[in-house]
Amino acid sequence: MIQRVATVAFEGVDARPVDVQVHVAPGLPAFTIVGLPDKAVTEAKERVRAALIASGLALPARRITVNLAPADLPKEGSHYDLPIALGLMAAIGAIPSDCLAGYTVVGELGLDGATAAVAGVLPAAIGANARGHGLICPAACGAEAAWASPDMEILAPASLIQLANHVTGRQVLARPDPRMRKGPDLLPDLRDVKGQETAKRALEVAAAGGHNLLYVGPPGAGKSMLAQRLPSILPPLSPAEMLDVSMVASVAGAIQDGALVDRRPFRAPHHSASMAAMVGGGMKARPGEVSLAHHGVLFLDELPEFSPQVLDSLRQPLESGEVLIARANHRVTYPARFQLVAAMNPCRCGKAGDPGFTCKRGPRCAEDYQGRLSGPFLDRIDIHLEVPAVTAADLVLPAPAEGSRDVAARVAAARQVQAERFAALDRPDLRTNAEATGPLLDIIASPDAAGLALLRDASDAMRLSARGYHRILRVARTLADLDGAEGIGRRHLAEALAYRALTDRPRLAA
Protein backbone atom coordinates (compact mmCIF):
# COMPACT_ATOMS: atom_id res chain seq x y z
CA MET A 1 0.00 0.00 0.00
CA ILE A 2 1.23 3.50 -0.84
CA GLN A 3 0.84 6.23 1.78
CA ARG A 4 0.39 9.76 0.42
CA VAL A 5 1.16 13.08 2.14
CA ALA A 6 0.68 16.51 0.56
CA THR A 7 3.45 19.11 0.69
CA VAL A 8 4.72 21.93 -1.55
CA ALA A 9 7.69 23.05 -3.66
CA PHE A 10 8.45 26.76 -3.96
CA GLU A 11 8.72 28.64 -7.23
CA GLY A 12 9.33 32.23 -6.23
CA VAL A 13 6.54 33.13 -3.81
CA ASP A 14 4.24 30.48 -5.29
CA ALA A 15 3.80 27.09 -3.64
CA ARG A 16 3.30 24.22 -6.09
CA PRO A 17 1.63 21.04 -4.75
CA VAL A 18 3.89 18.04 -4.27
CA ASP A 19 2.67 14.53 -3.49
CA VAL A 20 4.94 12.57 -1.13
CA GLN A 21 4.39 8.86 -1.87
CA VAL A 22 5.80 6.38 0.64
CA HIS A 23 6.07 2.70 -0.28
CA VAL A 24 7.24 0.04 2.19
CA ALA A 25 7.79 -3.35 0.50
CA PRO A 26 9.57 -6.64 1.26
CA GLY A 27 13.16 -6.82 0.13
CA LEU A 28 16.65 -5.91 1.18
CA PRO A 29 16.62 -3.02 3.72
CA ALA A 30 17.01 0.30 1.87
CA PHE A 31 15.76 3.88 2.09
CA THR A 32 15.59 5.69 -1.25
CA ILE A 33 14.22 9.13 -2.11
CA VAL A 34 13.46 9.86 -5.77
CA GLY A 35 11.87 12.76 -7.64
CA LEU A 36 14.77 15.16 -8.35
CA PRO A 37 15.76 15.79 -4.71
CA ASP A 38 18.65 18.11 -3.92
CA LYS A 39 21.29 17.39 -1.28
CA ALA A 40 19.15 18.66 1.61
CA VAL A 41 16.23 16.42 0.56
CA THR A 42 18.49 13.40 0.05
CA GLU A 43 19.89 13.84 3.58
CA ALA A 44 16.33 13.87 4.96
CA LYS A 45 16.38 10.07 5.27
CA GLU A 46 19.09 10.22 7.95
CA ARG A 47 17.26 12.93 9.91
CA VAL A 48 13.98 11.03 9.60
CA ARG A 49 15.60 7.76 10.72
CA ALA A 50 17.12 9.36 13.82
CA ALA A 51 13.93 11.32 14.63
CA LEU A 52 11.79 8.17 14.50
CA ILE A 53 14.20 6.27 16.74
CA ALA A 54 14.19 9.19 19.22
CA SER A 55 10.38 9.07 19.17
CA GLY A 56 10.32 5.38 20.08
CA LEU A 57 9.87 3.99 16.59
CA ALA A 58 12.20 2.01 14.35
CA LEU A 59 12.24 1.72 10.61
CA PRO A 60 11.22 -1.74 9.45
CA ALA A 61 13.86 -3.92 7.82
CA ARG A 62 12.23 -3.47 4.44
CA ARG A 63 12.73 -1.60 1.23
CA ILE A 64 11.44 1.97 1.66
CA THR A 65 10.92 4.14 -1.40
CA VAL A 66 9.81 7.77 -1.20
CA ASN A 67 8.71 9.44 -4.43
CA LEU A 68 8.25 13.22 -4.62
CA ALA A 69 5.75 13.81 -7.43
CA PRO A 70 5.77 15.40 -9.94
CA ALA A 71 9.09 13.73 -10.56
CA ASP A 72 10.34 16.34 -13.07
CA LEU A 73 10.07 19.28 -10.63
CA PRO A 74 13.31 19.98 -8.69
CA LYS A 75 12.83 19.61 -4.91
CA GLU A 76 14.93 21.82 -2.64
CA GLY A 77 15.01 22.54 1.07
CA SER A 78 14.61 20.79 4.39
CA HIS A 79 10.81 21.20 4.65
CA TYR A 80 10.29 17.69 3.22
CA ASP A 81 11.50 16.04 6.46
CA LEU A 82 8.17 16.18 8.27
CA PRO A 83 5.94 14.91 5.43
CA ILE A 84 8.35 12.02 4.76
CA ALA A 85 8.41 11.09 8.45
CA LEU A 86 4.61 11.27 8.79
CA GLY A 87 4.17 9.21 5.64
CA LEU A 88 6.45 6.53 7.07
CA MET A 89 4.64 6.58 10.43
CA ALA A 90 1.31 6.08 8.65
CA ALA A 91 2.76 3.35 6.44
CA ILE A 92 3.99 1.30 9.42
CA GLY A 93 0.80 1.86 11.44
CA ALA A 94 2.20 4.22 14.10
CA ILE A 95 -0.55 6.74 13.28
CA PRO A 96 -3.90 6.23 11.49
CA SER A 97 -3.43 6.10 7.73
CA ASP A 98 -6.26 8.58 7.10
CA CYS A 99 -5.27 11.23 9.68
CA LEU A 100 -3.18 13.19 7.17
CA ALA A 101 -5.91 13.50 4.54
CA GLY A 102 -6.79 17.12 3.93
CA TYR A 103 -3.51 18.48 5.30
CA THR A 104 -0.45 20.01 3.66
CA VAL A 105 2.70 19.28 5.65
CA VAL A 106 5.97 21.24 5.84
CA GLY A 107 8.74 21.14 8.43
CA GLU A 108 12.29 20.17 9.29
CA LEU A 109 13.19 17.54 11.88
CA GLY A 110 15.98 17.41 14.39
CA LEU A 111 17.66 14.17 15.36
CA ASP A 112 15.70 14.18 18.62
CA GLY A 113 12.34 14.32 16.84
CA ALA A 114 11.76 18.03 17.45
CA THR A 115 10.43 20.17 14.62
CA ALA A 116 12.47 23.13 13.37
CA ALA A 117 11.41 26.30 11.54
CA VAL A 118 11.62 26.40 7.75
CA ALA A 119 11.32 29.14 5.15
CA GLY A 120 8.17 29.63 3.10
CA VAL A 121 5.49 28.64 5.62
CA LEU A 122 3.24 31.60 4.78
CA PRO A 123 3.10 30.87 1.00
CA ALA A 124 2.61 27.18 1.84
CA ALA A 125 -0.31 28.04 4.14
CA ILE A 126 -1.92 30.31 1.55
CA GLY A 127 -1.53 27.63 -1.12
CA ALA A 128 -2.97 24.96 1.19
CA ASN A 129 -5.94 27.17 2.07
CA ALA A 130 -6.63 27.75 -1.64
CA ARG A 131 -6.84 23.96 -2.09
CA GLY A 132 -9.11 23.55 0.93
CA HIS A 133 -6.37 21.93 3.04
CA GLY A 134 -5.26 22.49 6.59
CA LEU A 135 -1.56 22.88 7.43
CA ILE A 136 0.86 20.97 9.64
CA CYS A 137 4.01 22.96 10.34
CA PRO A 138 6.64 23.39 13.10
CA ALA A 139 5.58 25.16 16.29
CA ALA A 140 8.01 28.01 15.57
CA CYS A 141 6.11 28.80 12.35
CA GLY A 142 2.56 28.43 13.64
CA ALA A 143 1.97 32.15 14.18
CA GLU A 144 3.17 32.87 10.65
CA ALA A 145 0.85 30.24 9.13
CA ALA A 146 -2.13 31.58 11.10
CA TRP A 147 -2.12 34.74 8.94
CA ALA A 148 -3.24 32.73 5.89
CA SER A 149 -6.88 32.44 7.05
CA PRO A 150 -8.73 32.64 10.38
CA ASP A 151 -10.85 29.61 9.41
CA MET A 152 -7.98 27.36 8.34
CA GLU A 153 -7.10 24.37 10.50
CA ILE A 154 -3.45 24.57 11.58
CA LEU A 155 -1.46 22.07 13.64
CA ALA A 156 1.89 23.32 14.92
CA PRO A 157 3.53 20.53 16.96
CA ALA A 158 6.87 20.97 18.66
CA SER A 159 7.82 17.33 18.02
CA LEU A 160 6.73 14.16 16.26
CA ILE A 161 5.46 12.76 19.56
CA GLN A 162 3.14 15.74 20.08
CA LEU A 163 1.63 15.28 16.64
CA ALA A 164 1.25 11.52 17.09
CA ASN A 165 -0.51 12.08 20.42
CA HIS A 166 -2.85 14.61 18.79
CA VAL A 167 -3.95 12.38 15.91
CA THR A 168 -4.45 9.42 18.26
CA GLY A 169 -6.55 11.47 20.69
CA ARG A 170 -4.15 11.52 23.65
CA GLN A 171 -3.40 15.26 23.31
CA VAL A 172 -5.07 18.28 21.74
CA LEU A 173 -2.99 20.88 19.92
CA ALA A 174 -4.46 24.38 20.06
CA ARG A 175 -4.57 26.49 16.91
CA PRO A 176 -1.73 29.08 16.98
CA ASP A 177 -2.62 32.77 16.99
CA PRO A 178 -1.16 35.22 14.47
CA ARG A 179 1.43 37.59 15.91
CA MET A 180 2.73 41.03 15.00
CA ARG A 181 6.30 42.03 15.76
CA LYS A 182 6.50 45.55 17.06
CA GLY A 183 8.92 47.75 15.17
CA PRO A 184 11.28 50.21 16.84
CA ASP A 185 9.40 52.81 18.89
CA LEU A 186 11.72 55.66 17.98
CA LEU A 187 12.70 56.10 14.36
CA PRO A 188 15.25 58.76 13.34
CA ASP A 189 13.36 62.06 13.16
CA LEU A 190 13.59 64.80 10.54
CA ARG A 191 13.86 67.27 13.40
CA ASP A 192 17.46 66.11 13.79
CA VAL A 193 18.37 67.57 10.38
CA LYS A 194 19.37 71.24 10.52
CA GLY A 195 19.19 73.26 7.34
CA GLN A 196 18.66 71.44 4.01
CA GLU A 197 15.06 72.64 3.67
CA THR A 198 15.02 71.94 -0.06
CA ALA A 199 16.28 68.39 0.51
CA LYS A 200 13.58 67.84 3.14
CA ARG A 201 10.95 69.07 0.71
CA ALA A 202 12.20 66.64 -1.94
CA LEU A 203 12.10 63.81 0.60
CA GLU A 204 8.48 64.65 1.44
CA VAL A 205 7.52 64.71 -2.25
CA ALA A 206 9.27 61.38 -2.86
CA ALA A 207 7.49 59.81 0.13
CA ALA A 208 4.08 61.16 -0.91
CA GLY A 209 4.24 59.81 -4.46
CA GLY A 210 6.60 56.86 -4.11
CA HIS A 211 9.13 58.55 -6.40
CA ASN A 212 12.77 57.57 -6.89
CA LEU A 213 15.20 60.10 -5.45
CA LEU A 214 18.90 60.90 -5.93
CA TYR A 215 20.89 63.21 -3.64
CA VAL A 216 24.16 64.63 -5.02
CA GLY A 217 26.41 66.55 -2.67
CA PRO A 218 29.74 66.75 -0.83
CA PRO A 219 30.59 64.48 2.12
CA GLY A 220 28.89 65.48 5.36
CA ALA A 221 26.04 67.35 3.68
CA GLY A 222 23.46 65.05 5.30
CA LYS A 223 22.45 62.89 2.30
CA SER A 224 22.51 59.57 4.18
CA MET A 225 21.01 61.22 7.26
CA LEU A 226 18.02 62.39 5.23
CA ALA A 227 17.53 59.02 3.53
CA GLN A 228 17.60 57.14 6.84
CA ARG A 229 14.71 59.31 8.04
CA LEU A 230 12.46 58.38 5.14
CA PRO A 231 10.84 55.43 7.02
CA SER A 232 9.67 57.86 9.71
CA ILE A 233 7.41 59.70 7.26
CA LEU A 234 6.12 56.73 5.26
CA PRO A 235 2.65 55.34 6.11
CA PRO A 236 2.43 51.80 7.53
CA LEU A 237 1.73 48.90 5.24
CA SER A 238 -1.88 48.16 4.35
CA PRO A 239 -3.06 44.58 5.07
CA ALA A 240 -2.67 43.58 1.41
CA GLU A 241 0.80 45.13 1.20
CA MET A 242 1.85 43.50 4.48
CA LEU A 243 0.86 40.11 3.07
CA ASP A 244 2.86 40.73 -0.12
CA VAL A 245 5.94 41.82 1.84
CA SER A 246 5.65 38.89 4.25
CA MET A 247 5.40 36.37 1.40
CA VAL A 248 8.82 37.44 0.11
CA ALA A 249 10.29 37.59 3.62
CA SER A 250 8.94 34.10 4.36
CA VAL A 251 10.53 32.57 1.25
CA ALA A 252 13.80 34.29 2.17
CA GLY A 253 13.60 32.98 5.75
CA ALA A 254 13.58 36.53 7.14
CA ILE A 255 10.50 36.25 9.39
CA GLN A 256 11.49 36.02 13.06
CA ASP A 257 9.43 33.91 15.49
CA GLY A 258 6.56 33.74 13.00
CA ALA A 259 5.61 37.39 13.63
CA LEU A 260 4.86 39.79 10.79
CA VAL A 261 5.82 43.47 10.68
CA ASP A 262 3.67 46.36 9.40
CA ARG A 263 6.64 48.68 8.83
CA ARG A 264 7.77 49.22 5.29
CA PRO A 265 11.10 47.49 4.59
CA PHE A 266 14.20 49.67 4.36
CA ARG A 267 17.09 47.87 2.69
CA ALA A 268 20.55 49.44 2.48
CA PRO A 269 23.00 46.97 0.85
CA HIS A 270 26.72 47.69 0.82
CA HIS A 271 28.19 48.83 -2.49
CA SER A 272 30.11 45.57 -2.78
CA ALA A 273 26.82 43.66 -3.32
CA SER A 274 26.83 41.30 -6.30
CA MET A 275 24.17 41.11 -8.98
CA ALA A 276 22.69 37.94 -7.45
CA ALA A 277 22.50 39.63 -4.07
CA MET A 278 20.80 42.67 -5.56
CA VAL A 279 18.21 41.20 -7.94
CA GLY A 280 18.14 37.61 -6.68
CA GLY A 281 19.52 34.34 -7.94
CA GLY A 282 22.11 31.86 -6.78
CA MET A 283 21.76 28.10 -6.78
CA LYS A 284 18.24 28.24 -5.31
CA ALA A 285 17.09 31.46 -7.03
CA ARG A 286 16.52 33.27 -3.76
CA PRO A 287 15.00 36.78 -3.68
CA GLY A 288 17.45 39.68 -3.76
CA GLU A 289 17.49 43.11 -2.15
CA VAL A 290 15.06 44.56 -4.70
CA SER A 291 12.45 41.96 -3.72
CA LEU A 292 13.14 42.24 0.01
CA ALA A 293 12.48 45.99 -0.43
CA HIS A 294 9.06 45.31 -2.05
CA HIS A 295 6.57 48.04 -1.01
CA GLY A 296 9.45 49.73 0.80
CA VAL A 297 12.71 51.57 0.22
CA LEU A 298 15.99 50.47 -1.37
CA PHE A 299 18.73 52.88 -0.27
CA LEU A 300 21.97 52.85 -2.25
CA ASP A 301 24.63 54.96 -0.55
CA GLU A 302 27.78 55.91 -2.50
CA LEU A 303 25.91 55.08 -5.72
CA PRO A 304 28.84 55.22 -8.22
CA GLU A 305 30.80 52.74 -6.08
CA PHE A 306 28.34 50.00 -7.03
CA SER A 307 29.27 47.89 -10.02
CA PRO A 308 27.83 49.39 -13.24
CA GLN A 309 26.44 45.98 -14.15
CA VAL A 310 24.63 45.76 -10.80
CA LEU A 311 23.10 49.21 -11.22
CA ASP A 312 21.97 48.51 -14.77
CA SER A 313 20.32 45.30 -13.58
CA LEU A 314 17.91 47.54 -11.63
CA ARG A 315 16.54 49.15 -14.78
CA GLN A 316 13.98 46.45 -15.56
CA PRO A 317 12.64 46.08 -11.97
CA LEU A 318 12.31 49.87 -11.68
CA GLU A 319 9.99 49.87 -14.70
CA SER A 320 8.00 46.64 -14.30
CA GLY A 321 7.89 46.22 -10.52
CA GLU A 322 9.05 42.60 -10.71
CA VAL A 323 12.20 40.66 -11.44
CA LEU A 324 12.42 37.47 -13.48
CA ILE A 325 15.28 35.13 -12.55
CA ALA A 326 16.03 32.67 -15.33
CA ARG A 327 18.53 29.89 -14.70
CA ALA A 328 19.19 26.50 -16.26
CA ASN A 329 16.88 24.75 -13.77
CA HIS A 330 14.92 27.74 -12.43
CA ARG A 331 12.61 30.37 -13.83
CA VAL A 332 10.94 32.31 -11.06
CA THR A 333 9.42 35.76 -10.72
CA TYR A 334 9.63 37.86 -7.55
CA PRO A 335 7.78 41.12 -6.91
CA ALA A 336 10.03 44.20 -6.75
CA ARG A 337 7.87 47.33 -6.48
CA PHE A 338 10.34 49.40 -4.46
CA GLN A 339 11.23 53.06 -4.05
CA LEU A 340 14.85 53.81 -4.93
CA VAL A 341 16.69 56.41 -2.84
CA ALA A 342 20.35 56.98 -3.64
CA ALA A 343 23.16 59.29 -2.52
CA MET A 344 26.46 60.12 -4.18
CA ASN A 345 29.35 62.57 -4.08
CA PRO A 346 29.91 64.79 -7.13
CA CYS A 347 33.40 63.31 -7.62
CA ARG A 348 35.78 60.90 -5.92
CA CYS A 349 37.16 63.50 -3.51
CA GLY A 350 33.70 64.98 -3.07
CA LYS A 351 34.72 68.63 -3.41
CA ALA A 352 33.84 69.33 -7.03
CA GLY A 353 31.98 72.59 -7.23
CA ASP A 354 33.11 73.86 -3.82
CA PRO A 355 33.91 77.61 -3.90
CA GLY A 356 37.65 78.24 -3.84
CA PHE A 357 38.61 74.60 -4.42
CA THR A 358 40.61 73.59 -7.48
CA CYS A 359 40.98 69.89 -8.19
CA LYS A 360 44.29 68.73 -9.64
CA ARG A 361 42.46 66.51 -12.08
CA GLY A 362 40.04 69.27 -13.08
CA PRO A 363 36.55 68.48 -14.39
CA ARG A 364 37.78 65.14 -15.68
CA CYS A 365 37.56 63.72 -12.14
CA ALA A 366 33.83 64.46 -11.83
CA GLU A 367 33.10 63.29 -15.37
CA ASP A 368 34.82 59.95 -14.84
CA TYR A 369 33.19 59.41 -11.46
CA GLN A 370 29.67 60.24 -12.57
CA GLY A 371 30.18 58.45 -15.87
CA ARG A 372 29.89 55.17 -13.97
CA LEU A 373 26.12 55.80 -13.96
CA SER A 374 24.44 55.06 -17.27
CA GLY A 375 22.00 57.49 -18.83
CA PRO A 376 19.10 54.99 -18.96
CA PHE A 377 19.54 54.27 -15.24
CA LEU A 378 19.51 57.98 -14.32
CA ASP A 379 16.48 58.51 -16.55
CA ARG A 380 14.48 56.22 -14.25
CA ILE A 381 15.05 58.45 -11.21
CA ASP A 382 12.27 61.03 -10.79
CA ILE A 383 13.95 63.56 -8.49
CA HIS A 384 17.59 64.64 -8.81
CA LEU A 385 18.64 67.14 -6.16
CA GLU A 386 21.96 68.80 -5.39
CA VAL A 387 22.52 68.97 -1.63
CA PRO A 388 24.93 71.76 -0.61
CA ALA A 389 27.30 71.53 2.33
CA VAL A 390 25.91 72.51 5.72
CA THR A 391 27.45 75.67 7.14
CA ALA A 392 28.31 76.42 10.76
CA ALA A 393 25.50 78.99 10.77
CA ASP A 394 23.01 76.17 10.11
CA LEU A 395 24.42 73.95 12.85
CA VAL A 396 24.19 76.56 15.62
CA LEU A 397 20.51 77.19 14.93
CA PRO A 398 17.94 75.48 17.18
CA ALA A 399 16.28 72.30 15.99
CA PRO A 400 13.44 72.90 13.51
CA ALA A 401 9.93 72.93 14.94
CA GLU A 402 8.55 70.55 12.31
CA GLY A 403 9.45 66.91 12.71
CA SER A 404 8.64 63.61 11.07
CA ARG A 405 5.18 63.41 12.64
CA ASP A 406 3.99 66.58 10.87
CA VAL A 407 5.48 65.57 7.53
CA ALA A 408 4.08 62.02 7.85
CA ALA A 409 0.56 63.46 8.28
CA ARG A 410 0.84 65.35 4.99
CA VAL A 411 2.29 62.30 3.24
CA ALA A 412 -0.53 60.08 4.52
CA ALA A 413 -3.16 62.59 3.36
CA ALA A 414 -1.61 62.78 -0.12
CA ARG A 415 -1.43 59.00 -0.42
CA GLN A 416 -5.06 58.69 0.65
CA VAL A 417 -6.06 61.08 -2.13
CA GLN A 418 -4.11 58.99 -4.64
CA ALA A 419 -5.64 55.72 -3.45
CA GLU A 420 -9.17 57.15 -3.73
CA ARG A 421 -8.45 58.54 -7.20
CA PHE A 422 -7.17 55.19 -8.49
CA ALA A 423 -10.09 53.34 -6.91
CA ALA A 424 -12.52 55.70 -8.68
CA LEU A 425 -10.76 54.87 -11.96
CA ASP A 426 -11.19 51.13 -11.28
CA ARG A 427 -7.48 50.66 -10.61
CA PRO A 428 -7.36 49.64 -6.93
CA ASP A 429 -4.08 47.82 -7.61
CA LEU A 430 -2.30 51.19 -7.86
CA ARG A 431 -1.49 53.12 -4.69
CA THR A 432 0.90 55.94 -5.63
CA ASN A 433 1.44 58.32 -8.53
CA ALA A 434 4.80 56.69 -9.29
CA GLU A 435 2.93 53.55 -10.41
CA ALA A 436 0.67 55.36 -12.89
CA THR A 437 1.17 54.35 -16.52
CA GLY A 438 1.18 56.60 -19.60
CA PRO A 439 -2.51 56.31 -20.58
CA LEU A 440 -3.56 56.81 -16.96
CA LEU A 441 -1.38 59.90 -16.68
CA ASP A 442 -3.36 61.50 -19.52
CA ILE A 443 -6.41 61.29 -17.26
CA ILE A 444 -5.01 62.23 -13.85
CA ALA A 445 -2.10 64.53 -14.77
CA SER A 446 -3.25 66.79 -17.57
CA PRO A 447 -1.72 70.26 -16.96
CA ASP A 448 -3.50 73.54 -17.65
CA ALA A 449 -2.62 75.70 -20.67
CA ALA A 450 0.17 77.63 -18.94
CA GLY A 451 1.66 74.46 -17.53
CA LEU A 452 1.48 72.69 -20.89
CA ALA A 453 3.35 75.53 -22.58
CA LEU A 454 6.05 75.43 -19.91
CA LEU A 455 6.36 71.65 -20.19
CA ARG A 456 6.65 71.81 -23.98
CA ASP A 457 9.41 74.42 -23.87
CA ALA A 458 11.27 72.63 -21.08
CA SER A 459 11.07 69.28 -22.90
CA ASP A 460 12.81 70.79 -25.91
CA ALA A 461 15.42 72.64 -23.83
CA MET A 462 16.21 69.69 -21.55
CA ARG A 463 15.92 67.05 -24.32
CA LEU A 464 13.59 64.94 -22.20
CA SER A 465 12.92 61.36 -23.19
CA ALA A 466 9.35 60.03 -23.16
CA ARG A 467 10.14 58.36 -19.84
CA GLY A 468 11.47 61.62 -18.39
CA TYR A 469 8.39 63.47 -19.65
CA HIS A 470 6.05 61.05 -17.88
CA ARG A 471 8.07 61.11 -14.69
CA ILE A 472 7.82 64.90 -14.53
CA LEU A 473 4.04 64.58 -14.86
CA ARG A 474 3.98 62.05 -12.00
CA VAL A 475 5.99 64.32 -9.71
CA ALA A 476 3.79 67.31 -10.64
CA ARG A 477 0.68 65.27 -9.81
CA THR A 478 2.15 64.50 -6.38
CA LEU A 479 2.97 68.18 -5.80
CA ALA A 480 -0.63 69.07 -6.63
CA ASP A 481 -1.87 66.38 -4.20
CA LEU A 482 0.31 67.81 -1.42
CA ASP A 483 -1.19 71.24 -2.14
CA GLY A 484 -4.71 69.84 -2.20
CA ALA A 485 -5.15 71.04 -5.80
CA GLU A 486 -7.51 69.27 -8.19
CA GLY A 487 -5.46 70.00 -11.32
CA ILE A 488 -1.81 70.51 -12.21
CA GLY A 489 -0.73 74.14 -12.54
CA ARG A 490 2.33 75.87 -13.89
CA ARG A 491 3.97 76.12 -10.43
CA HIS A 492 3.66 72.37 -9.89
CA LEU A 493 5.33 71.66 -13.22
CA ALA A 494 8.00 74.28 -12.55
CA GLU A 495 8.97 72.59 -9.29
CA ALA A 496 8.90 69.14 -10.90
CA LEU A 497 11.17 70.39 -13.70
CA ALA A 498 13.54 71.90 -11.14
CA TYR A 499 13.93 68.46 -9.57
CA ARG A 500 14.90 67.13 -12.99
CA ALA A 501 17.23 69.94 -14.04
CA LEU A 502 20.34 68.31 -12.58
CA THR A 503 20.23 65.54 -15.21
CA ASP A 504 20.58 68.14 -17.97
CA ARG A 505 24.08 69.09 -16.89
CA PRO A 506 26.81 67.67 -19.12
CA ARG A 507 28.79 66.51 -16.12
CA LEU A 508 25.99 64.09 -15.20
CA ALA A 509 25.51 62.71 -18.70
CA ALA A 510 26.46 59.08 -19.13
Image: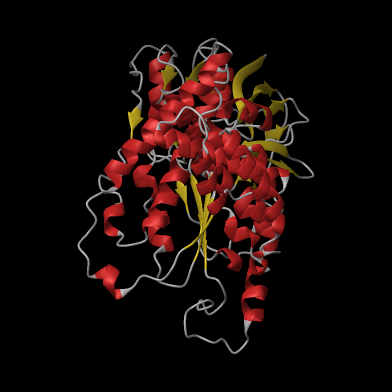
In screen coordinates, is 374 left or right of 413?
right
User: In the image, is residue 288 above or below residue 169?
Assistant: below
Please state the horizontal and vertical placement of residue 126, each as a whole percent of the image: 53, 21
User: In the image, is residue 144 above or below residue 153?
Assistant: below
Work out which quarter of the rendered image holds the C terminus and state it: bottom right
Q: Nearer the viewer, residue 90 or 199?
A: 199
Residue 118 visible in the displayed image: no
Identified at 63% across, 48% down, the residue is 280
Q: How is the image coloured?
A: secondary structure
Q: Nearer the viewer, residue 184 or 72?
A: 184
Residue 319 visible in the displayed image: yes
User: In the image, is residue 297 above or below residue 423?
Assistant: below
User: In the image, is residue 204 above or below residue 447?
Assistant: below
Please state the horizontal and vertical placement of residue 27, each as a whole percent of the image: 73, 27
User: Which residue is the extreme one toward the bottom?
Assistant: 360
Please state the horizontal and vertical placement of residue 366, each as a whole percent of the image: 62, 75
Q: Nearer the viewer, residue 20 or 381?
A: 381
Work out which quarter of the rendered image holds the N terminus and state it: top right
Q: Nearer the viewer, residue 73 or 407?
A: 407
Please state the horizontal and vertical placement of residue 263, each as a whole percent of the image: 38, 39
